Image: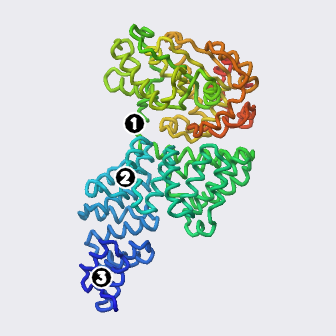
Amino acid sequence: MAEVLPTHAGAAFDALGRGDAALAERAARAGLARTPGDVAWRVVLALALSAQRRPAEAMPIFEALVAAEPGVPEHWTNLGNCLCELERETDALAPLQRAFQMGDRSAAMFFALARAELAHGRPLPALTCIDRALAEVPLDPEFRVFRARILFAMDETDAAAEALAGLRDPALPLALRVEAAEIQLNLAQYDAAEAAFDAILREDPGHPSALIGLATCHERANRLEAAAEVRSRIDPTRAAGDPDVASALDQLDARLADRAGDPATTRRLLERVLAHPPKDPALRTNLRFELGKACTALKDLPAAHEAFRMGHTERLAMVTAAHPALFREDGLLAVLDKPVPPFARGYEGADDGRRAPIFVVGFPRSGTTLLEQLLDAHPGLASFDEQPFLQRLVTRMNATPPGYPAALPSLDAATRRDFRARYFADVDRIRPDLGDRRPVDKNPLYLVRLPLAAALFPDARAILALRHPCDVVLSCWMQNFRAPAFAVTFETLASTARMYDRVFRTYFAFRDAIGIPTHELRYEDLVADVEGEGRRLFDVLGLPWDDALLGFTERAKSRGVISTPSYTQVVQPVNRRAVGRWQAWRPWFEGEVLDVLRPWAERFGYAID
């Protein structure tokens, strides 16, 4: 029986609405055969082609429509959407802005405009646009996934995770579920991402993007054999059919080559990827940092310096667009250089039966993660990776003037009890198995939060991790930290050195005032003599030594994900490879950097000259 096609464009539009784009295409072609040039049928045809993921065929039709009827805003919106589907989001901005100026307020226009704004590195207007689209169609899963992507670009990780909530419905298109799982992976929600990729692979065992995502989850959890096994299941022919997938596979292979100690292969693959950089600015930036590390391992320091410089430039541009307040030194940076007001340490009424944490502090990249792994190996202690528990309390204090730290003297017993309860509720949520063990709270820049710790925990202890200031500054500059403040402060070696100076000036200004017993431990001493330094450390903490603690790096492998940049190092046997690394970079340290760091090196007993 011959197929009965819609004979009116309106009926063909209805077919599009039902998801039958192929039927709409056939109807449009038949209609255009009868009435060549009919605008309504041309719109149906172009939209039907776009709906079937054939934007290259639809593009000339949309271009002809805006040329023929430039006063119709929907034509400009359709053109902008088609450009987005062709991954030409930056080119889409102009036609979409024209559609907006002409009065189009449709959800489709705002969604496309959000994509174009993000591609131009403007996440704040992109968020406004996607929210306008969701106001019209609040349950649209594609809009919700893209909103999560925008929030991730703004470093709003909690909000991005919330935006993805409820998007595991197996009825959703597979491509959308893959995209949501990839965002979860970027958000460090590795268990959730792994579960999502596994579910996708049950439906399509050879799905290349899901296999790449699952292998990445395993690598990030230091399960390298599992990562290699999943990688072996990827069909190279199927992956090569999509340039984005081929790029993602190169990125995975570069990461696995790095873990195998093959920086030459890592560099080759990353340079191939960056020859056609991914459109996602966060991903592109991270790849530049990975390239810089590969070039460093190959001792090509000029190439490494250029890769790091470009990475910092791109990261700073994103942070500038998303967090303008950072340049007013809000938040963490606002505390630096402020005097700590006099206050009473501890308080009457700390009778909740909870043991105060051991705070592991130090400038980032000073060996705090290695130290944390050693402490966590002790049966009397339990760590929970880096968590913003104290920072949440500081944020709560800052909601009411005068904020932190000026409000410390006015904290009454009821407020302190409330803050302790909130802190330990966070601890219990992360470590419900804590039991009688004492919590270890490792967060490097708690250096400037210790006054609050002293006010809440009468029996708190602190361990200050130290490392050669030049090695610390170099290592910080070589990292792509997610914290927006770090993108500002670690942009150059000089700016990183200045921040090191500011942080330690602040720390020593209030160290004696807070009165928390603090044990200083040098990274270089620990890696040279783990047992000797470990015995001294646990003696200070009043805990017994056990030779089994010497295997703490092996134990770290069983912990799964370690959410710090050093996750690949702390599962390796303790070694001295990172000691003195800055010397190879000395030409870039001469002048201001060494001038700023020399007094601290001398104070901590390190040689520079």
Q: Residues within 10 Å of mark 1 (few under 14, many from 20)?
A: few
Which residue is depicted at the point 26% across and 53% down? 135
Between 528 and 191, the one nearer to me in the picture: 191
Q: x and y percent of residue 544 in the render?
A: 66, 15
Give the labeled residue for mark 2: 126
Q: Against 97, is 374 above or below?
A: above
N-terminal-most mark, 2 or 1? 2
Residue located beneath label 3 in the image: 41
Q: Judge left or right: residue 540 versus residue 459.
A: right
Disc 1 secondary structure class: helix
In this view, the mark in front (2 or 1) = 2
The image shows residue 479, relative to residue 448, as above or below, that is below
Q: What residue lies at 68% left-to-right and 25% top-to-bottom?
A: 523
Amino acid type, label 2: Ala
Of the pair 87 and 302, the residue shown nearer to us: 87
| Residue contact between numbered discs 3 and 2, judged by CB atoms under 8 Å | no
How many angstroms separate mark 3 from mark 2 (CA)? 32 Å
Q: Looking at the image, which residue is at 49% across and 16% down?
A: 355
**Mark 2 touching mark 1, by CB under 8 A?**
no
Residue type at mark 1: give it.
Ala
Q: Residue 278, percent across and down?
A: 54, 58
In the rendered image, residue 361, in percent from the top left (x then y), is placed at 56, 23
For label 2, count other residues whose C-alpha is less than 10 Å away and answer few (under 14), some (14-19) or many (20+).
many
111 relative position to 230: left or right = left
Instruction: Name the kind of residue labelled 3 in the image.
Output: Trp
Q: Secondary structure at mark 2?
A: helix
The one nearer the camera, 146 or 211, is 211
Mark in front: 3 vs 2 = 3
Q: CA distance from mark 2 to mark 1?
A: 18 Å
Q: CA distance from mark 3 to mark 1?
A: 50 Å
Q: How many marks?
A: 3
